[in-house]
Amino acid sequence: MKTYKTGLLMGVFDLFHVGHLQLIRNASAHCESLRVGVLSDELVRRYKGHDPVIPEEERRQIVEAVKGVNEAFIVRGEVTKIGEWYRKPYDCFFSGDDHAGDPYWENEKEELQKLGSDIQFFPYTESQSTAGIIQKIIQNSGGYQ
C-alpha cells in the first residue's frame, strides 16, 4: 500500500540526469498517482536567471516518459504549492532535501497540512546536477568538435 493517493513534484528537469530520475522514482514509490510540473522556460529565466538548455515542451515529454509519472504538465505563472493544491488537490508534495529546513518551505508545509496535504523531502543527489553538467561541458568545450 502506498502512503499517498496523489503526489505532486515540480522542477525544471533540464538536461535530465540520474538525480531527476531518483527524485521521480522516490516520489512515485510513495503515491498511487504522480503528477509532475515542469517549469516553463519563462519561469526558469525568472528564477534561475538564464534560459534552460532543453525547451519546456521537450522537458515535459521527457518527464512524461519516465515510469511512474502519471501526468506531466508545464507550470506557468506563479509557482506555489498552495496555489497548485487549490487548482488540483494532492496529498503530498515531493522535493529534494536541499529545501528541507528552509523557512519558506516550512511555512508552505504548515499551510498544506492545514489543507490535509503534506511535503516529503528525499535525499538530494549531490553527485549530479544540471549546473554541474553544464560546468563540465564548459570546461571540456575545447575537446569537443
Image (cartoon, rainbow, N blue to C red):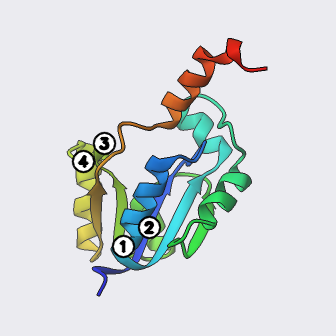
N-terminal of the pair, mark 2 or mark 1, is: 2
Residue at image mark 3: 98
Label of residue 100 in the image: 4
Secondary structure at badge 2 equals strand
Label 4 Cα crowd, 10 Å radius (few <14 / some 14-19 / many 20+): some
Label 1 Cα crowd, 10 Å radius (few <14 / some 14-19 / many 20+): some
Secondary structure at badge 3 equals helix
N-terminal of the pair, mark 2 or mark 4, is: 2
Residue at image mark 2: 8
Q: Residue at x 60, y 42 (%)?
A: 15
Label 4 or label 1, whichever lies nearer to me, is 1
Amino acid carrying mark 3 in the image: Asp
Label 1 or label 3, whichever lies nearer to me, is 1
Instruction: Report, in whole angstroms, how far the alpha carbon at label 4 lies from the one at label 3.
Output: 6 Å
| Image position, residue 80 (x, y; %) | 44, 56
Label 3 Cα crowd, 10 Å radius (few <14 / some 14-19 / many 20+): few
Secondary structure at badge 1 equals helix
Residue in front for this viewpoint, 105 or 142: 142
Instruction: Report, in whole angstroms, how far the alpha carbon at label 2 lies from the one at label 1.
Output: 12 Å
Q: Is residue 35 above or below residue 125?
A: below
Q: Is residue 91 visible?
A: no
Amino acid carrying mark 2 in the image: Leu
Q: In this view, does 130 lie above or below 138?
A: below
Q: In terms of image quadrants, where is residue 28? A: bottom left
Image quarter in which the C terminus is found: top right
